[in-house]
Image (tube, rainbow, N blue to C red):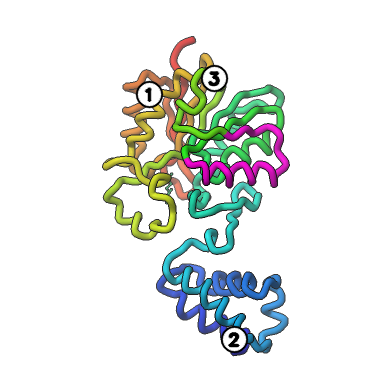
Amino acid sequence: MRLDAAITDAVERLAPASDSTRLDAEILLCQTIDMPRSYLFAHPEDELDDLTIERFEALLRRRIDGEPMSYITGVKEFWSRELLVSPATLVPRPETELLVELALREIPRKAEWRILDLGTGSGAIAVSIAGERPLSNITATDLSPEALAIAAENVRQADLANVTCIEGSWAAAVAGKQFDLVVSNPPYVRSDDAALQKLRHEPRSALTSGEDGLDDIRILASDCAAILAANGLLMMEHGAEQQTDVANILEAAGWVEIACHNDLAGLPRVTVARRNGT
Ligand code: GLN
C-alpha cells in the first residue's frame, strides 16, 4: 500500500474515535516508520511493506479503541515541555496550566518557597513550577509508585535539582513538614459521570473520588492546614460545576480568602484558599 493511501484509509477509520483524525494518522505513521512528519509530505508514493503496515495497524487499533494519543506516543506537551506519560498517570490537561499560572503569580522569584504538589501523577505541575522558580523547593507526592517513577523521570529529563518525589497518600506523605504553598489536581469526577466512559484508559483512581467526586477534596481541605506555614496557600483544581461545593467545604474547614478562578474556556476550575491564623 502507498503511504498516502495508508493515511487516507486511517483517517476514515479514526473518525468515530478522534476529533483530529489526520493529525493522529500522521503521528502514528511517523511513529511506525520512525520519520519526521515532513517525510510524509515529501514521499506520498512510498510503498509500505507488510511488516510496516502490520505495525501501523496495531497502533491504529489502539487509537480506534479510544486510547489517548499520549499513551500510544508516550508523551504529552504541557507548559512548553514534552513530558513522559504512561497509563499509570493521567494525561496532563491544558486546563491544569491555569493551576500552574496561579501558583506562579504567588511564588516570588527571589525567595525560597517550599511548595508541595499532592498527587503529582506525571509530575506536570511540579516540573512546570520548578522550572519557572529555580529558587523554590518542590515536593511532589503520589500514592502510585508507577506514577511517581514517571514523575521522577520527568524531573530528571528536565534537569531540575529542586524537586523531591515522595510516595504516599495526600498530607500523610509529608507529615511533620511545612510548606508555603500546596497545589493539587486531585481526582474529582463524579462516579456516575458519563464522561468516564471516554476516559476508561486513564487510571480510575486519578479521576474519580466518591459519588460526588469531592471525597479527596474534603480530605485535602481538612488535612492541608497542618502542613502549611502561617498564611500558607492551598490551590486545587476541580470540576466546572463544583465551585460552590468546594468553597463550602473549605469554609467549613476554616479556610479564608477563598477565591475561584476561570480557565481559558471561562469555566470555574481552580480554587485558592488561605490558611487561617498563625
Ligand atoms: N479534568 C479531567 C477530566 O475531566 C479530570 C482530571 C481530574 O480528575 N483531576 O477529564
Q: Which mark is residue 154?
A: none
Q: Which mark is residue 50?
A: 2
User: Percent position (x, y) of residue 141?
Assistant: 53, 34
Could you tell me if the residues under marks 2 and 1 are in contact, i.e. CB atoms within 8 Å? no
Question: Height in image: 9 above or below 58?
Answer: below
42 vs 71, nearest the viewer: 71
Q: Is residue 2 left or right of residue 268?
A: right
In the figure, residue 104 lies in which quadrant? top right
Q: Amino acid at mark 2?
A: Asp
Q: Amino acid at mark 3?
A: Lys
Q: Which residue is mark 1?
A: 222
Q: Residues within 10 Å of mark 1 (few under 14, many from 20)?
A: some
Q: Which residue is mark 3?
A: 177
Q: Is residue 209 left or right of residue 109?
A: left
Any magenta on residue 160? yes
Q: Label 3 to label 1, Cα distance in Å? A: 16 Å
Q: Can residue 124 be seen in the rendering of this structure?
A: no
User: Percent position (x, y) of residue 63?
Assistant: 48, 69
Q: Residues within 10 Å of mark 2 (few under 14, many from 20)?
A: few
